[in-house]
Each structure stands twice: as C-alpha cells, then as structure tokens.
Image (spheres, grey):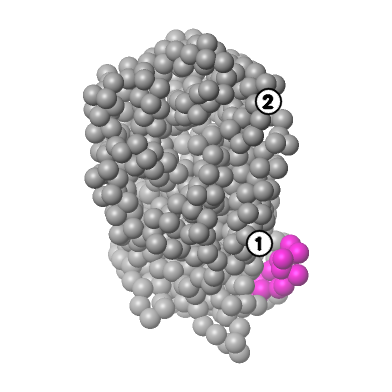
Amino acid sequence: MKVEKYLKTYRELIFKRNDEYIPLKKSDFTLFFETGDRLTYEKTYFAGRKALTVRALQMLLSKENDRAVTEKLIGIINCILSEPVWALPAHCGKDAWDTGKYGIDLFAAETAGSLAQILYLITGKIPEPEHKALVEAFERRFETEIRSKWEKEKPWWEEGNTNWTAVCAGNIGIAFVFLWKMGMISDELLAMQNDRIQRSLYTYIGGFGTDGCCREGISYYNYGMGYLLGLLELWEGEGLCLEEVTKIKSEINKRHISEFLFSIYLGNKRFVSFSDTTGTEPLNLGIFAYLSYMNGGLILPKEYEEGDIDGFELFGGEECGRFAPALREYLWVEKYKESLKTGALPSESLLRDAEWYVARFENGLSFAIKGGNNKEPHNHNDVGSFMLTYRGIPVVAELGSGEYTADYFGEKRYEYLCTGSKGHNVPVCKGLYQKTDTDGGAFEFREGVFTKDLSPSYGLEAGSLIRKAFSVRENETPCVRIEDRSNYDLTESVITFEHPKIEGENVFITVYPKECEGKTFVITFENAEKLHCEELNYKTHNGVSKTVFRVTGRKNKEAGYIALSITA
C-alpha cells in the first residue's frame, strides 16, 4: 500500500480544516426528553469534539508553534471544561443539565480520555502557567465527572461485553495513565485503577466468540476495539500491566478478533450491514495497522492499494470527531506501515459462532447471510436475513441502523423498518413477523449449504420453518438460492433500494451507480403466487429520509417450500 501518499494527504487535509466550537444549548438538550430527537443536540456536541480534535492535531502535527491554533485549542478546552454535562441526553436524566447528576456514559468517558491525552501531549507547547491552569481545571472536572462516580459505584457496563465496556473502561484507563504521567496521581492509585480496568477488558473480549465476530456490527467493533488497543499500547509503552497486555493480545488473536474486519468485506470498500451499522463505514487504517502488526500480518483488499484517502476514516470520524482514533489514524499508520499489505481475500468467510456467512465471487458479486437469535446487542429481528451486493452496491439490501431516537431504544424499537423483520429479507410466517427476545434455532453449515431453523424466531415449534441458502454456478455465472421449507402459510420478501420491475415470477433489479454500469439482476420466485411491490420510507442513521422497495410473494398452498434464485 502507498502509505506515504495516505500520510501526506492526511496532513494536508488536517491543516485545511477550520472547525470551531459551538456552544451547547439547554433547549437542544431537553428536546430529547420532549420529542425523542437526539440529532439536534448531538450535532452541536460533536461539532465541539471535532473542533477539539482538529485543533489538537494541527498543533501536534505542525513543525511550528502557531499561536493562533494554540489559542483556539486552549479556548476549546476551556469551553468543554465548562460544559454543564459531558454525557448525552439519551444517557442521562432530563435534570442532568442543572444538577450535574448522571452516570459515566460513553461520551463523558471519551471526553475525559481525550482531554487527558491532549493536555499531556501539549506539555511544553504552550506557556507553562496556562498549561498548569488547564491541567488543574481538568483534574477538578475529572474528579467530579469520572473518579468520584467510578469509586462510589459499579457502572452497569463495567462487567459487560459490548462496546460500552471497552470505550468507557478504555478511556478511564487512558485518563488515569496521563494524569499519572503529569504527576497528578500516585503510583498506588494508578495500580489500583489499572487492576479494575483490566477486568473490564477481559469481559469485553469475552463477548466475542471464537470466530471474532462483533454482532453489534463493524462500527461498534471499530469503536470498542480502538480504545481497547489504545490502552494496551499505552500500558505497554509505560511498562504497565505487561503480563495482562500479553494475555489480552493473545486472546484477541486466539479468538480471531483481528480478522473480523475483512471477514465481512463485500468489495468496493463496503462491509456487511447487519445490526446497527451501515456497511459504508470508513476503515480506521490505524486500528487495522496495529491489528496487522499484532496478528503477524493481515491482508488489506486491493482496493486500498493506492492509498487514496477515500474509504478511510478521517479525524476520528466525521460524525463524532474522536481525538484518540484520529491521532491513531496517523501515528499508527506511520509506525506500523510495514504491516500494511494488500492482496486477495478468501472467497468465503464463515463466522460459525455468530452464524454469519459471506461469499465473494470473482465477478464482483458478494452474498452474506446471518442466523443468530433475536436477543443480540443492538438487536434487529433479522434471523435468516441476507444481502447481496455487486461491486459493493446493494442489490438485495440490509438497511442497517436507523435514526437513533428515544423510541428507537425504547418499547417501539421494532416498529422501525430498520429493526423490525418487515425491513429485512426474511419470510412472514402464518401472518407473523419475527418476535424479539427469542432464541435462535438449530444451525448447520455443511458443504457450502447454510441451514437455519427460523421457527423459534416466530414463536413456532422447532423444525417448522427451515431456511437453506447456497450458491451455485450456472454457465460460469454465480447464482444464489434461498429456500424456505414449511407447511405453514409463507410470504417471501426482498428489500431493495432500486425500483424493481416485476414480470410474472421474475423481479428485475438494475443497479445504476457508476461502479455497476447499469447491471441487471433477476430474482426468480419459485412456488409463489402473484408478486407485489410496496414502497416504504425510513430515516437513516443520520436522519435522512430514504425510500426502499419491498417485493413479496406468497407461497402456493400446495407447495412445501418457496424459493428465491438470484442471477445476473
């Protein structure tokens, strides 16, 4: 990979940025409790974090001391230290703005970790009195925001196995180390905190199966693993917790966690979009470089060879602007660049514990299907759902995450198209959609055939609805076949972003993005009555309204199965 090109472009882009801090408003904060709207407040909140990241990077990567940048950074740090709340409204009560009473959430922990690291890294780059004042102000805020809460009670995420555990524990650990390096806490206190944080890291790693799959999706994998790895490298560099660092790294490799990113790769810098993710998340090249170094050598797909900035996460992500990931996007790439090798990926990946399967064909077609259950982290009612892409562009779509609102994480979660089974490529059985909080049925993968009992997902007796999926080649053209067997009434459904054309039992889907050159795919419904198409609307994770099409076909009453065959 052309690493120097990537690094040069990254530096050029960071110095072109002119992000500014935007003051937070109480009216935006309370909007969540009045309407369920998260985005209004969060856009302003993350704009401030992005400004912090950009100005800190400009200062750290500059060969000269630009006083204007320094003053802007100091101003931003003071603004953040003065914010009434570091947590998001979705993670605390409506009175938190006035009382300051709330628990440690992802973003309070991230803010603490970011400020601690930045304040240490700019030591000597700003006048000593100003630096001393900032560090003392941060220590006071850290005491009330993090340390006092951390020492009084055990947060719910401390013994969890989701991204929350890695992000919160990782950032608290990072903050304690940098406070220690600045002489603000003792060796004894640091050792005590490190012991506690180690236990959280182990529980987080325990949430992965032996196949390395993050069932929350790729964005949450990047989020959690980024902070875990950042803390491990920090500990190692300071000679702290070395035995535990070695054990955790070994566990990451043993569980194949390092290999997850490109086991779910579909092509054209796009990934599987099961769960609350989009599949178009950019790759944090720093995290991948460190994982590749740690693993002994991972393979980047050839699409990344040229080192073009497109497809890579920049500045900690445009949505959130996280400092530590942004810094690693540069420093880890530079440090571990010898580990960045491109090549061909395997033609298929099976994540057996999670029951995910991905097939990649030479003509640019990729197919992914999942089993699992309906009680997973960031759960969707989607047992048996599948997606098909051509050169990374969805033909049969998985919508991924919708707009995060109060209801999206409340009792109405499965009324959203993205999360309920109506928005997934699964059948309707006996007029029923899939139920939440249900166990998964039996799973088998043998000789290229994916078999999953979907019955428990509908509250039916085991073995009464079986889905099989496999791919075959007809005249050297890949063909994917989905077959559902049941004596119950079944209606098959397919979700697509492109307006389909229906002719008899065939559905024609043409993918128009330039990468696809207007290629048409044919989905044949076998043993189905007249097909129907409905237009549905939903909001993406960023709150953008989008239209999709749902094609359905009901199984003939006399047939014991209904099937879909998909060809180009």
**Dot label at residue 545:** none
> Which residue in the structure is indicated by mark 2?
66
Residue type marked 1 = Glu
Q: Nearer the viewer, residue 253 or 373?
A: 253
Q: Which quarter of the figure is the N terminus placed in?
A: bottom right
Q: Which residue does the image show at 70% across and 61% down from the upper left?
A: 498
Q: Give the farthest residue toward the bottom.
A: 475
Q: Tell me the distance, in whole angstroms, between the alpha carbons under discs 1 and 2.
A: 32 Å
Q: What segment is highlighted magenta in the picture?
A: 506-522
Residue type marked 2 = Asp
Judged from the image, the secondary structure of the residue bearing numbered disc 1 is loop
Q: Which quarter of the figure is the C terminus placed in?
A: bottom right
Q: Nearer the viewer, residue 6 or 379?
A: 6
**Dot label at residue 306:** 1
**Quadrant in the rendering for residue 20:** top right
In this rendering, which labeled residue sits more in front, label 1 or label 2?
Answer: 2
